[in-house]
C-alpha cells in the first residue's frame, strides 16, 4: 500500500504541475511562525538534524510559515508576534517559492531563525549573502505575491485535521506528532520503507504518543 506521503506528493503534482517528491521518502511538514521563540529553537537546534547523516535523503520537507496568524475580514494578516512576524513569515514563504530546493530554503530559514533567537532581527537581510541566494524573495514580497502565498498557507493551516493546538506543529506523512515533535527523527525513520536507511536512523529513541501536555515550551493558538 502506498504511504500517505506518496498521496501528498500526488496532490502536490496535480496542483503545481511537477512531481516534487521521491516516492519512498517520508513527508515531514512543519507548521510554524517566524518569531515564536520555540519555533526558532526547533528549527535551529532540531530540524537542522536533516543536514546530518544523510537524513535529508529520505525526507520531503514542507515548511509552512503561517502558524497562529489570523486572516482578517479585510484580507490583512494579524500575527501573534506583531507586524515584523507577518513580514518575515511572508519573506520565508517567498524564499520557499523562489528556491524550492529544500536544502537551499532551509539554509536561509535557519539563518533567519538563528538571528531571531539571538535578538538580531535587523540583520535578517544578510541571510541572502550568508546562504549565497539572490534577494529575489524581497521582490516577491514587494510585488504582493507573498500575500498570495500566505493566503494559501493560511487556508492549508485552517484545514489541518486535527486542528493545530500550538506551534511548532509537526506532521510525519500527515500524522501530527503532537507533543513529541522534537522526536521527529524517530518518526521519520520508522515511517521510511525504502532500502537506503541513513545513519541517523541507528539507533533510535522511543516514540512517545502518550504525552498529554507539551513537554517543551510552545506558542499556543489563540
Image (cartoon, rainbow, N blue to C red):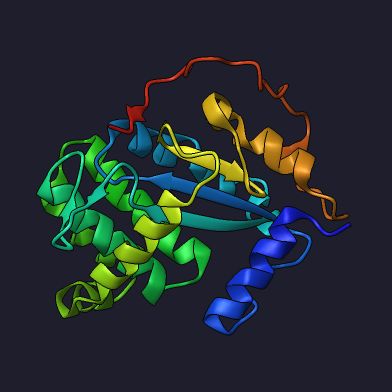
Q: Is residue 19 visible?
A: yes
- Residue 193 spot, x, y in % from top left: 84, 51
Q: Residue at x 47, y 19 (%)?
A: 214
View extreme (front): residue: 73
170 horizontally vs 6: left or right: left
204 horizontally vs 93: left or right: right
Q: Quadrant of the N terminus?
A: bottom right
Q: Residue at x 50, y 70 (%)?
A: 101
- Residue 96 spot, x, y in % from top left: 40, 66
54 horizontally vs 129: left or right: right
For this rendering, which residue is in front, 160 or 190? Answer: 160
Position above or below: 178 against 71 = above
Q: Quadrant of residue 97?
A: bottom left
- Residue 164 spot, x, y in % from top left: 45, 38
Q: Quadrant of residue 21?
A: bottom right
Q: Is residue 124 visible?
A: no
Q: Residue at x 40, y 40 (%)?
A: 44
Q: Residue at x 27, y 55 (%)?
A: 89
55 horizontally vs 123: left or right: right
Q: Quadrant of the C terminus?
A: top left
Amino acid at each position: 500500500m502506498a504511504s500517505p506521503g506518496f498521496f501528498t506528493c500526488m496532490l502536490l503534482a496535480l496542483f503545481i504541475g511537477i512531481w516534487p517528491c521521491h516516492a519512498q521518502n517520508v513527508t515531514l511538514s512543519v507548521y510554524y511562525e517566524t518569531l515564536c521563540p520555540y519555533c526558532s529553537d526547533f528549527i535551529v537546534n532540531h530540524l537542522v538534524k536533516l543536514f546530518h547523516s544523510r537524513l535529508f535523503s529520505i525526507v520531503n520537507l514542507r515548511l509552512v510559515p503561517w502558524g497562529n496568524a489570523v486572516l482578517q475580514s479585510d484580507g490583512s494578516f494579524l500575527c501573534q508576534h506583531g507586524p515584523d512576524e507577518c513580514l518575515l513569515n511572508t519573506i520565508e514563504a517567498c524564499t520557499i517559492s523562489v528556491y524550492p530546493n529544500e536544502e537551499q530554503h532551509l539554509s536561509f530559514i535557519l539563518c533567519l531563525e538563528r538571528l531571531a533567537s539571538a535578538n538580531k532581527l535587523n540583520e535578517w537581510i544578510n541571510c541572502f549573502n550568508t546562504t549565497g541566494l539572490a534577494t529575489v524573495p524581497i521582490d516577491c514580497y514587494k510585488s504582493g505575491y507573498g500575500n498570495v502565498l500566505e493566503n494559501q498557507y493560511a487556508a492549508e493551516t485552517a484545514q489541518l485535521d486535527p486542528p493545530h493546538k500550538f506551534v511548532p506543529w509537526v506532521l510525519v506523512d500527515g500524522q501530527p506528532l503532537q507533543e513529541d515533535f522534537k522526536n521527529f527523527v524517530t518518526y521519520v525513520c520508522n515511517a521510511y520503507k525504502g532500502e537506503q536507511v541513513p545513519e541517523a536512523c541507528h539507533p533510535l529513541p522511543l516514540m512517545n504518543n502518550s504525552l498529554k501536555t507539551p513537554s517543551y515550551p510552545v506558542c499556543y493558538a489563540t
